[in-house]
Amino acid sequence: MSPENDTALGIVEQYEKGVVRRIADFQDPRQEWRRLFSELLGTFFLVLVAAGGGMMGHAFPNTISRTAAVVAPALMVMAIILFMGKVSGAHLNPAVSIAFALRRDFPWWRVPGYIVVQLAGATLAALFLHNVINVSAMYGSNYPAAGYSAGAAFWMEFILTLGLVSVILGTASGAQNIGIFGALGVGGYIALAGLWGSPISGASMNPARTFGPDLVGSNFTHYWVYIAGPIAGAVVAVAVAFVLRGRAGGMSGSGAAQGDLFPEVVDPKKA
């Protein structure tokens, strides 16, 4: 064998060893902090935009339209999925984490940590906005529209989240996994849902997104709507996914949910 071939094989062997080492490092439970930091940072940026639209609109009247306020978070979600989806799965939403776990694409032991950092990221975003814009975080939260009951807002959050989680599970399942273009489907749905559904409930679809501004604004009026609606919608979406595709999302589903090409649950159907 020529010296050139020896050199080439040496480079390939070093690369393969490096890949194996990185995989082992990432699967090490001690690396879970990277995923948690990713969820905290991603939820921070999502709520920064989602709550920031209402708060900035209050500080500067007639500058931010409702269309801009609901499309901006959708674009932010697309960006977050693209730039760090492989790290944590970019759930950014307790309802999504619960849905992936129910679908058996995501380990249940990781759900509490994800939810805690999602709530923390949302709270940090609301604190940042409150201190910078100098208006109450209440203007960045979600409440049932005047003249509409909490029940109406609940059903709106339920149906909107059912659609959102169905899109997320669908674009992360088996042959329907469409890679980075899943970000377009999820972001597009969030924009469309907000454009028609936001007048009644605010189209939160995310308990963390509403929790942060409510905590900082010290107003949890009707917050139950924004917990019960999204979680109920997510649970039904898992049932719909089962009817459409069967049990679990396969290897691609677990990879998309966990944010790693080599997730803990390699074949969720055997988990």
Image (cartoon, rainbow, N blue to C red):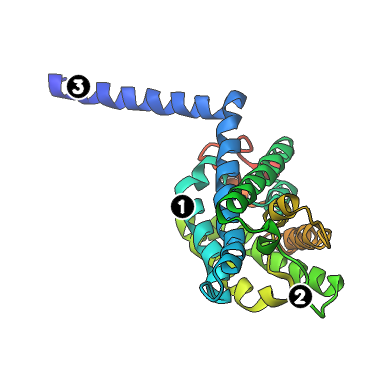
Instruction: Name the quadrant of the C terminus.
Output: top right
Mark 1 vs mark 3, foreground winner is 1
Q: Secondary structure at mark 3?
A: helix
Q: Is residue 95 left or right of residue 21?
A: right
Q: What residue is pinned by disc 1? A: 82
The residues bearing labels 1 and 3 have C-alpha atoms spaced at a distance of: 36 Å
The residues bearing labels 2 and 1 have C-alpha atoms spaced at a distance of: 33 Å
Upstream in sequence: badge 3 or badge 2: 3
Foreground residue among 214 and 85? 214
The residue under the point 78% across, 52% down is: 218
Foreground residue among 239 and 220? 220
Check disc 2: other Cα within 10 Å, few if <14, some if 14-19, many if 20+.
some
Mark 3 vs mark 2, foreground winner is 2
The residue under the point 49% across, 45% down is: 84
Q: Amino acid at mark 1?
A: Leu
The residue under the point 69% across, 77% down is: 199
Can you see residue 77?
A: yes
Upstream in sequence: badge 1 or badge 3: 3
In the rendered image, the vertical position of residue 123 relative to residue 16, given as above or below: below
The residue under the point 76% across, 75% down is: 145
Q: What residue is pinned by disc 2? A: 145
Q: Is residue 158 left or right of residue 60?
A: right
Can you see residue 252?
A: no
Q: Secondary structure at mark 1?
A: helix
Q: Amino acid at mark 3?
A: Thr
Kindly indicate whether the residue at mark 3 contacts the one at mark 1 (C-beta within 8 angstroms): no
Question: Where is residue 54, by image quadrant?
Answer: bottom right
Q: Position of residue 158 (x, y in %)?
A: 77, 67
| Image disc number at residue 7 | 3
Q: Position of residue 237 (x, y in %)?
A: 73, 62
Question: Where is residue 153, by image quadrant?
Answer: bottom right
Q: Secondary structure at mark 2?
A: loop
